[in-house]
Image (cartoon, rainbow, N blue to C red):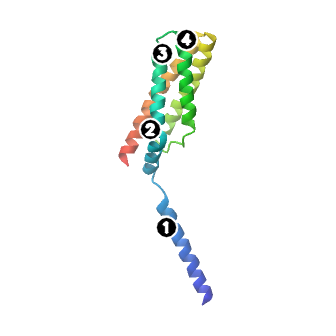
Amino acid sequence: MQFRVRTLAVATTAVATAVLLAGCSSTPAEELKDWWSSGGEGRVKALSDTSSRVNEVSMRPMDTWGPACQELLTEVAKTKKLDTLPSKNAQGLWKEALTAFEHGGNECVAGAGKKDEAQASAGIREVQKGIGRLAAAVSVIRSDLAAK
């Protein structure tokens, strides 16, 4: 009899644990909403603002390019510390945007530092490519958030 009671207690505990674990899991939509509200939206805005600034200064004298590109690199570094984007639909675009911003920003800073307009301009063009990728990623994220 004692063996049956222990078996029942162990089985009941296992079922209760499984129910609790299943009840605690989040849906992908909830994870995306949490990501967005706990820093994702702010990171998107910061990337958008600083990449737009890089685009804007590209029409000004080259001595303004380096600082704007460095500011973008700082925002990319902060964004990389954020949890992974939980939208499988937007992850590729998000990664492409960050890669373009980082690569382009580095080329821009290096070119501006050497007064190499061709290199700095190539970096800015890469940042501009990233702006399009960021816009596409945000569009997918917003669709995913709306579909919850």
Mark 2 secondary-structure assignment: helix
Q: Which residue is mark 2?
A: 41
Q: Which residue is mark 1?
A: 19
Mark 3 secondary-structure assignment: helix
Which dot, 1 or 4, sits closer to the camera? 4
The N terminus: image quadrant: bottom right
* Dot 4 amino acid type: Asp
* Dot 3 amino acid type: Val
Real-space Cα separation, disc 1 to disc 2, in angstroms: 33 Å
Can residue 118 be seen from the camera position used here?
yes
Q: Where is residue 57 shown, x and y percent of the image? A: 48, 15
Mark 1 secondary-structure assignment: helix
Mark 2: few, some, or many residues within 10 Å (few <14, many ≥20)?
Answer: some
* Dot 2 amino acid type: Glu
Q: Where is residue 95 shown, x and y percent of the image? A: 53, 34
Would you identify the image quadrant in which residue 9 lies? Answer: bottom right
Q: Against 3, is 15 above or below?
A: above
Q: Which residue is mark 3?
A: 57
Q: Are marks 3 and 2 in contact (CB under 8 Å)?
A: no
Q: Residue at x 52, y 72 (%)?
A: 15
- Marker disc for residue 11: none
Mark 4 secondary-structure assignment: helix
Of the image marks 1 and 4, the number of the one nearer the N terminus: 1
Q: Against 65, is 82 above or below?
A: below
Q: Which residue is mark 4?
A: 63
Q: Is residue 110 left or right of residue 46?
A: right
Real-space Cα separation, disc 1 to disc 4, in angstroms: 61 Å
Of the image marks 1 and 2, the number of the one nearer the N terminus: 1
Real-space Cα separation, disc 3 to disc 2, in angstroms: 24 Å
* Dot 1 amino acid type: Val
